[in-house]
Amino acid sequence: MEKPVYMVNGSKGGVGKSIFSMAIIHYLGKRDQKVLLIDADTANPDVGKAYGKTIETRYINLDERDGWMDLVNCLAEELDHTVVINTPARSSEGVKLYGALLTESLAEIKRDLVTLWVINSQRDSLQLLKEYMDTVNTGTTHVVRNLYHGPERKFELYNNSKIRTAVEAQGKTLNFPEVADRISDQLHSERLTIQRVIETAPVGNRAEVNRWVKECATIFDEVVA
Ligand SMILES: Nc1ncnc2c1ncn2[C@@H]1O[C@H](COP(=O)(O)OP(=O)(O)OP(=O)(O)O)[C@@H](O)[C@H]1O
Ligand SMILES: [Mg+2]
């Protein structure tokens, strides 16, 4: 099998897809993986703006059929890169219409799709997840409870759901830790990479980023081969 493709999704706006994408890019980089970022949030490519100068980056619009063809072509060309796809809010329409283009090509190009579905504590994330798993019935889908939205028990709708059983029959449920606002602000507003924040932050801030990065690593260890 060639290097895997990590699709960070969740379909909803503001659940934490971008910051999660940054965290996994940082993790993979630290493990000497060559990472290709595909920022599919072409209207607001915040991950691309932070990482575009550091790692190979493409901007691909997955609302359009051409975008899905470009995505498959790119995955077929860059076999030595581990791929992280950061998706925009409301990506489910594109997946429904054109997602088969990807799923049908993955076997041919021998790449494994790992979806990381980021949720908050609300119900609509789960309905969208069900639709996603019905459409993209290949690879592995993990659910990421983003603890920025509250402690694990606040995710009771997911915790007690049938969809959780379906997820855990093939993947995992993970907890993504919260980082202090002043750090996430630097990633978002100043367009800094996590590495850059670590290198330039005052000692207290650096301790906080390092704590977060370490906690993130424990969840990525579970899903990254
Ligand atoms: N684990 C976290 N720790 C700290 N802040 C977080 C965390 N998760 C999300 N946030 C904050 O919540 C806001 C939304 O996060 P982010 O931009 O990553 O979401 P998104 O799903 O990519 O949104 P969009 O759909 O608009 O692209 C940001 O200000 C971000 O810093
Ligand atoms: Mg985003």
Image: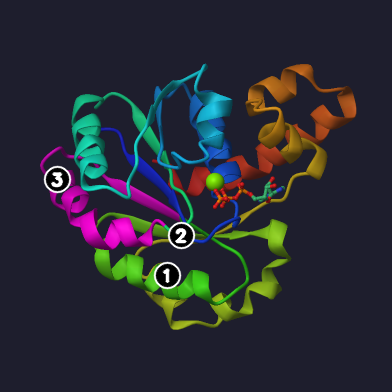
The kind of residue tagged 2 is: Ser
Q: Is residue 32 above or below residue 73?
A: above
Find residue 154 and report its image quarter. Answer: bottom right
**Kind of element beneath mark 1:** helix
Answer above or below: position of 125 versus 16.
below
The residue at which mark 2 appears reads as: 11
In the image, taking residue 10 as reference, residue 166 lies left or right, namely left
Identify which residue is drawn at 26% across, 37% down. Answer: 71
**Which quarter of the figure has residue 169?**
bottom left
Residue beneath the point at 72% across and 25% down = 197
**Left or right: 152 in relation to 37:** right
Q: Which mark is residue 128?
A: 1
Q: Are marks 2 and 1 in contact (CB under 8 Å)?
A: yes
User: Label 3's element?
Assistant: helix
Quadrant (top left/top right/bottom left/bottom right) for the N terminus: top left
What residue sits right under mark 3 in the picture?
105
The amino acid type found where label 1 is placed reads Leu
Q: Quadrant of the C terminus?
A: top left
Q: What range is drawn magenta here?
A: 91-116
Label whose residue precedes the other's in the sequence (3 or 2): 2
